[in-house]
Amino acid sequence: MEESVMKVREHLEYPELTMYQMVKKMAESVPEEPAEDFYGKKISFKALLGRIDRAAKALYDLGVRKGDAVTICLPNIPQALDCFYGLNKIGAIANMVHPLSAYKEIIFYLNASQSKMILTADLFYEKVRQAANEADHPVTVMVARMQDELNPFLKAAFVIKKGHEVLKYPNVEGDLLWKNLNKKTENIEDCPESSFDAKRTAVILYSGGTSGVPKGICLSDLNMNACALQAKEAIQQEFRSGLTMLSCMPIFHGFGLGMNIHIVLIHGACCILMPTFNIKTYTEMLVKKKPSFIAGVPTIFEALLHMPDLDNVDLSFLRGMFCGGDSLSVELKKKIDEFLVAHGADIQVREGYGLTECVTASCLTPRDESRPGSIGLPFPDTVYCIVKPGTDEEVPRGEEGEIILTGPSVMLGYLNDPEETAQTLRTLADGRVWMYTGDLGYMDKDGYVYYKQRIKRLIITNGYNVYPGQVENAIDSCPEVSYSCVIGVKDPRRMHRVRAYIVLKDGEVGDDAMKEKIMARLKESVAGYALPKEIIFREELPKTLVGKVAYRVLEEEANAEEA
């Protein structure tokens, strides 16, 4: 049966509730409906709330209090959600970190947030323990095991496959096993529940900085709830219990946390959790679980077009497909839409746009209309404006400029960085705080927004943001290196692949052994997805008139080679 298209309301009501209270409200409304599906193990809303409450009690018993930060360094597994909402209940801060981060990156995240504890998986324990050892303050490591959440058959298969190499963790005195912590809560009195405060930091997510230093993005309960409520309204269709989302985007990413988890739970739908991603398992889950909604990056959907396992598969169960994390080309959108029609799905892929600084998406293409190249219309209560770069001077419709926006999902600011915050968040003559995105675009006469490119340097590979300055800093720290430049080269599979141009110091030889030596150093401080796929040694690199490396010249040169 075709679903009627709902008209998008311009203004919404935002309840003065924490994220925990929003989930609790839904648990009281639909207690027996499934909230999570983890490899066939279903957790009801009632059971989820019980797990969250136990997590909150365990954390409180360990001394975590309102305003304290705890780092969550996990993939999409049930314990990550328990800890996230448990921290929110007691008013603590969830510091969200990529589990594939290099150990030196984890040191930075622990120090920047002053996290008292970190929750990670046994698979990452040694790396995280090393980072905790080198933090500038004491950090307790808590260990969650994915196998503890599997049904008995899958758990046995997991242990056989993995052997016992990870069952010995944690092995440092003082570190804790998450499963044991939760067992001990039966005799602990319930902990105080934190009240709503629109100015309190509830979550810290990370984005890169132009200087190569990651930026902590401080988000409130209002930011997170508003984004989820706005997105549901912009979707223009039912989002309720009985419906499901294939939650493959990671919880430490704004897109994953906001659009794959929080929006789902506060509207009573079910998260089908995927802790790891590859296109084969994603395809298997899509066919087996028949999710109502899927949300991902362009590379995921492009890969689906070429999967033989989807030949002749009926995808009419799909109610929505949402794309973010990178721009969706007109050509790829056309191919995906044709693929959906050929497989019985009465939908189009819908592109969203946003930044972590406003949780995730703040703009979405309408349900039954698209304009070539457009990223759609702003969410309710979110206003977009195009200004002349470097100013607050609005440009005429159709003219390109910097995208700025204002609304209830805009962040509180950057962690410990008032200067960068002041540059990004500016109070203009209308009295509202506007976020300067650093992106170029324009609006047409009907208010549709068009994204062109980023003003600041950024590489997007497989949906992950790679900040060249951060990788260059790591390369330049190698004693053999004089200087470097990191660029993104267009790639049909990844969107971009990371390439490093390196000028060595006099007397050093740029051979394969040198490449291996540099890569070994990089792996200590650069996440795997951000590592260069290619290293090219040069005698010198092109420079601008002021002496900076002309990275755009290198980009043009490299992409011309690929054409």
Image: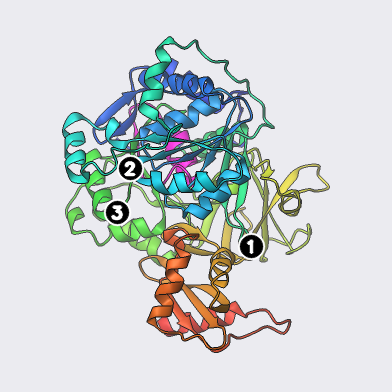
Q: Amino acid at mark 1?
A: Thr
Is residue 543 among the parts visible in the rendering?
yes
**214 vs 230: above or below:** below
Label 1: which residue? 210
Q: Is residue 37 above or below residue 372?
A: above
Residue 142 against residue 563 in the figure, above or below: above
Whole-number angstrom distance, CA of label 1 to CA of label 2:
32 Å
Task: Name the quarter where the N terminus is drawn.
Answer: top left
> Does the magenta run of residues contain 311?
no
How far apart marks 3 and 2 lie (CA) works out to: 10 Å
Point out the tag, 3 or 1, that comes first from the N-terminus.
1
Indicate left or right for 74 with 431 as reference. left
SS at circle 2: loop
Quadrant in the rendering for residue 199: top right
Q: Is residue 250 magenta?
A: yes
Q: Earlier in the sequence, mark 1 or mark 2?
A: 1
Q: Callout 3, which amino acid?
A: Asn
| Residue that carries the numbered disc 2 in the rendered image | 274
Q: Amino acid at mark 2?
A: Met
Reading the image, the residue beneath label 3 is: 278
Give the structural element (helix, strand or loop) at label 3.
loop
Secondary structure of the residue carrying tag 1 is: loop
Q: What's drawn in magenta, residue-wise?
A: 239-265
Residue 480 is situated, as x and y percent measured from the top left of the image, at: 53, 78
Q: Position of residue 487 (x, y in %)?
A: 52, 73
- Image location of residue 225, percent across then percent down: 56, 32
Mark 1 nearby-residue class (10 Å; few <14, some 14–19, many ≥20): some
Of residues 551 and 125, the one drawn nearer to the viewer in this rendering: 125
x then y, percent, for residue 519:
43, 70
CA–CA distance in space, label 3 to label 1: 30 Å
